[in-house]
Image (cartoon, helix red, strand yellow):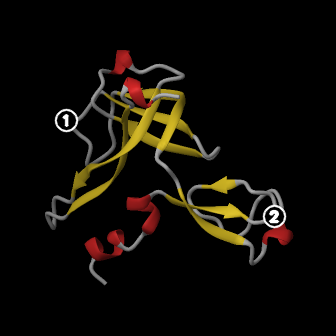
Amino acid sequence: MAVPRYWREIPQRYNLVGTKCGSCGKIYFPPKVVCPTCRRKSLGHMEDCALAGRGTVESYTIIYAPPPHFEGEEPYTMALIKMDEGCYLMGQVVDLEPQEIHIGLRVEACFRRIYEDGTRGAIQYGYKFKKMEEAETP
């Protein structure tokens, strides 16, 4: 299977699909086969759950020395985001200067370019987060 096709076929990479435990109701991302809380009681009771893509910044860090494929993008911000459904995601916050990002900032997922594979030229896409418009905050 070609690498671009492989990445496109991972549902949570593009659609924010997690799982919900049919026993306790907790939602997990990325998807889990067994609920870490209920364990054996959750076997066969984990269901796919689409996340709305909205959440709140719980913590963040500014990257000044990026890993390969991200050179030239620094500084950029990575944040721990508590989704409205209760699970946590790690993601890059875009369209804001690092000093504009703060704990409690409401964000929403957006589909963006992650990086380009230099040897094959394949562009990898995925979710990042941007500030929610004022009218959309609860």
Query: Can residue 3 be seen at all in this image of the molecule?
Result: yes
Q: Quadrant of residue 73?
A: top left
**Residue 116's disc number:** none
- Check disc 2 and report the residue beneath it: 23
- The N terminus: image quadrant: bottom left
First in residue order: circle 2 vs circle 1: 2
The answer to whether 111 is drawn above or below residue 63 in the figure is below
The answer to whether 108 is drawn above or below residue 74 in the figure is below
Dot 2 lies on which element? loop
Single out the residue that lies furthest toward the front: 135
Image spot of residue 133 (x, y percent): 36, 28
How far apart marks 2 and 1 lie (CA) works out to: 46 Å
Q: Quadrant of residue 120?
A: bottom left
Image spot of residue 111 (x, y percent): 30, 50
Mark 1, Cα crowd under 10 Å, few <14 / some 14-19 / many 20+, is few
Image spot of residue 62 (x, y percent): 40, 26
Query: Which amino acid, by three-letter code, is at mark 1?
Result: Gly
Image spot of residue 70 (x, y percent): 26, 43
Mark in the foreground, 2 or 1: 2
Query: Which amino acid, by three-letter code, is at mark 2?
Result: Ser
Specify whether 43 is left or right of 7: right
Q: Measuring 38% from the left and 74% from the top, which residue is drawn there?
A: 9
Mark 2, Cα crowd under 10 Å, few <14 / some 14-19 / many 20+, is some
Q: Nearer the viewer, residue 103 or 2?
A: 103
- Check disc 1 and report the residue beneath it: 72
Q: Measuring 35% from the left and 21% from the top, which residue is drawn there?
A: 98
The answer to whether 96 is drawn above or below residue 111 in the figure is above
Query: Can residue 33 be seen at all in this image of the molecule?
Result: no
Q: Nearer the viewer, residue 83 or 120?
A: 83
